[in-house]
Image: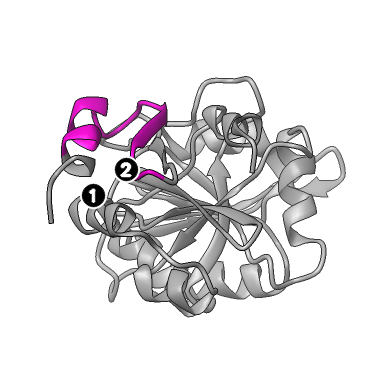
Amino acid sequence: MCRASFARWRGEGTPAPCGCVLLSVTPSVQIGGVMSAEVYRLTGDVDEDAAAIDLAVSALKRGELVVIPTETVYGLVADDSVVGAVDRIYAAKQRDAGKPLQLLVSGVDVIDALGFVLSDVERRLAEKFWPGGLTLIVEHDGRIEGFRVPDSEIALEIVKRVGGALRSTSANSSGDPAALTAGEAEGYLGDSVSVVLDGGAVVGGVASSVVRVDGSGCVEVLREGAVAKADLIAVGNMNG
């Protein structure tokens, strides 16, 4: 894979999560003849937010788009096992089809199950910064993916419930600032999404750092974000 291919990951960030619980339901409203997203206010506890999580998972399994809070910025997610779901993300964001979307995963075991082989350096980075604001670009047998394990119980629960992986990107229109609240995300995406999980303003407010490890084991930071470049390189250069 040429370096230009990895450069595509320097663009928009992705998601991660903060806890959520169902406090109230904002009824969907008619906008221009189309129903807007249903917004669910969360508490941050997986058990208390079970109803909201169930609705989000059901929507994803139907191929619909869902907005979730993360520890970085609000994320837009889809189940790519459903035909057409990922296309809806590109349409909703007006995103260039040539720009890849990361995979939110529940853990390294999912990456292994997908047939990707992590190097020692990649595993060291994963152990140190996951769950958290690191997107790790992994190439294996001609395939390339960006993986991240979000640091949010709610987000992780949703990811697990749909099989361990969700396509994800920041919940905004391409070229616009990342959404730090559910209201901002809904304003960007409108009726393109079915469910918005409102966990309040995100704490981090900075997109994930995007990293790849080259064939010689050197860490290349494609985008510095939630994890400092110096910390990433330091962990990558550790022995053993």
Report the residue at 66% width, 57% height from top.
Answer: 142
Among the 4 quarters of the image, the one containing residue 90: top right
Question: Which residue reaches farthest left?
Answer: 239
For the residue marked with disc 1, what is the amino acid? Phe
Asked whether the residues under the numbered discs 1 and 2 touch, taking CB atoms below 8 Å apart as contact, a structural biologist would say yes
Q: Residue 219: x and y, percent? A: 34, 37
Q: Is-magenta flag for residue 130?
A: no
Q: Position of residue 206 (x, y in %)?
A: 35, 29
Magenta residues, as a range?
216-234
Q: Quadrant of residue 56?
A: bottom right
Spatial distance from mark 1 to mark 2, Cα to Cα?
7 Å
Reading the image, the residue beneath label 1 is 129
> Residue 229 in magenta?
yes
The residue shown at (23%, 28%) is 228
| Whole-percent x, y for residue 194 in the image | 66, 56
Query: Which quadrant holds the C terminus?
Result: bottom left
Establish if 213 lies above or below 26: above
> In this figure, what is the number of numbered marks?
2
Is residue 182 something that shows in the picture? Answer: yes
Which residue is label 2 attached to? 133
Q: Residue at x 80, y 41 (%)?
A: 91
Instruction: Give the number of the mark in front: 1 or 2.
Output: 1
Q: Secondary structure at mark 2?
A: loop
Where residue 115 sits, quadrant-wise, is bottom right
Q: Nearer the viewer, residue 75 or 130?
A: 130
Q: Give the side of residue 170 with respect to residue 30, left or right.
A: left
